[in-house]
Amino acid sequence: MKKRDLLSLRDLSRDDIQGIFALAGRLKREQKRGIAHRLLAGKTLALVFEKPSLRTRASFETGIVQLGGHAVFLGPAEIQLGVRESPADCARSLSRWVDLIVVRTFSQNTLEEIAHYATVPVINGLTDLFHPCQILADCFTLLEHRGKLEGLKIAFIGDGNNMAHTWMQAAEKWSFSFSLACPKGYEPSAEITRVAKENGGRVVVTNDVAEAVRGVDVIYTDVWMSMGQEGEREIRRKAFRGYQVNAEVLALAKRNALVMHCLPAHRGEEITDETLESPHSIVFDQAENRLHAQKAILVWALKGMKGSRVKGRKR
Ligand code: CP
Ligand code: NVA
């Protein structure tokens, strides 16, 4: 059987995602009732990270322990990918000891090289291009709040970055509409946008915040400077002025619109404190659901999950 990697959302079928959401929901409900699961008893998860992390690291480490396994964290100082050791040798060595690898790298190519050489499943814990675990947790959170994804209008205000790219891939899977407003020069990859549209994604890219946000159900944002772009701080601060999620922008959306952010947030830049703390904000539900969604992703990667079903329409 081919190993199951999750390098981008394109690695998952609608059935896989429905199964992941169904299992995540069950694990969440049962965890809250104190029911323990040992679905991955004795399994070891390695976390290979080139960048900092709070949510991804803590939720994967906690998740594998809750499923009966344990984690080994290998940060930038330990591995020094491509300096101390090649990604290929790192992947082949780790595969002799551990059962799964979560990777956070700058380049998607490094992740793909690790996946190519690893003989165990590899999961994308964020690259410069994609963050599939985040968007799966976010879609699961939206299902909890709205009951369905189909028909929703989602606006993304900010950089055409890894989060924006992953939303566009998600728009290939569900018939929600996705409108992205970014400053000129910060548009998402033309190729990812083209493929999303070709595959039926209802995606609009604009430089006009009001156009993107008017009448939407969800406003999503992310930092103006992603990890690795710290040197562009001043340029980006200027470029993104006017692309802040605040009370004025929120007033253009539906009255009960939800505000989402993958976190970490830079309050006062991409979002105001007031909006992040408002009743519209579901950012900590998103953060919590990283745990539940990723536990299901780990089970999918090692065991598959034929037969699980949640609401949704197959394209
Ligand atoms: N949202 C997210 O991935 O957070 P971390 O960078 O803290 O892992
Ligand atoms: N776009 C951000 C997301 C952090 C979760 C980054 O890559 O730093």
Image (cartoon, rainbow, N blue to C red):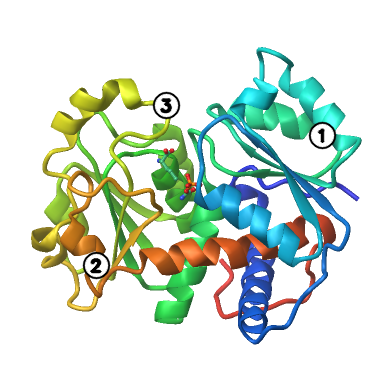
Residue 149 seen in this snapshot: no
Query: What is the C-alpha distance between the residues marked 1 and 2?
Result: 42 Å
Q: Position of residue 131 (x, y in %)?
A: 52, 46
Residue 22 in picture, x, y percent from top left: 65, 76
Q: How dense is the environment of label 1, judged by Cα within 10 Å: few (below 14), some, or many (20 and up)?
A: many
Task: Report whether 132 appears left or right of 45.
Answer: left
Amino acid type for the residue under numbered disc 1: Ala
In x, y percent, where is residue 227?
42, 32
Q: Nearer the viewer, mark 1 or mark 3?
A: 3
Farthest residue toward the bottom?
33
* Along the line of sight, the residue nearer the viewer: 19 or 168: 19
Circle 2 sits in a helix, a strand or a loop, which is it?
loop
Q: Secondary structure at mark 1?
A: loop
Q: Is residue 50 visible?
A: yes
Q: Which residue: 43% across, 52% down?
A: 167
Residue nearest the observer in this picture, 17 or 25: 25
Q: Earlier in the sequence, mark 2 or mark 3?
A: 2
Q: How far apart are the two marked residues, 2 and 3, measured between alpha carbons?
A: 31 Å
Q: Mark 3 CB in 8 Å range of ligand 2? A: yes
Q: Amino acid at mark 3?
A: Gly
Disc 3 packing (10 Å; few <14; some 14–19; many ≥20): few
The image quadrant that residue 235 belongs to is top left
**Crowd class of label 2 (few under 14; some 14 to 19; many from 20; radius 10 Å):** many
Q: Which residue in the structure is indicated by mark 1?
A: 118
**Circles 2 and 3: CB distance less than 8 Å?**
no
Q: Secondary structure at mark 3?
A: loop
Disc sitting over residue 228 in the figure: 3
| Residue 33, position as x, y percentages in the image | 65, 87
The reply, left or right, for residue 192 in relation to residue 123 is: left
Q: Amino acid at mark 2?
A: Val
Sequence order check: which comes first, mark 1 or mark 3?
1
Q: Given this view, does label 2 or label 3 mark the residue nearer the observer?
A: 3
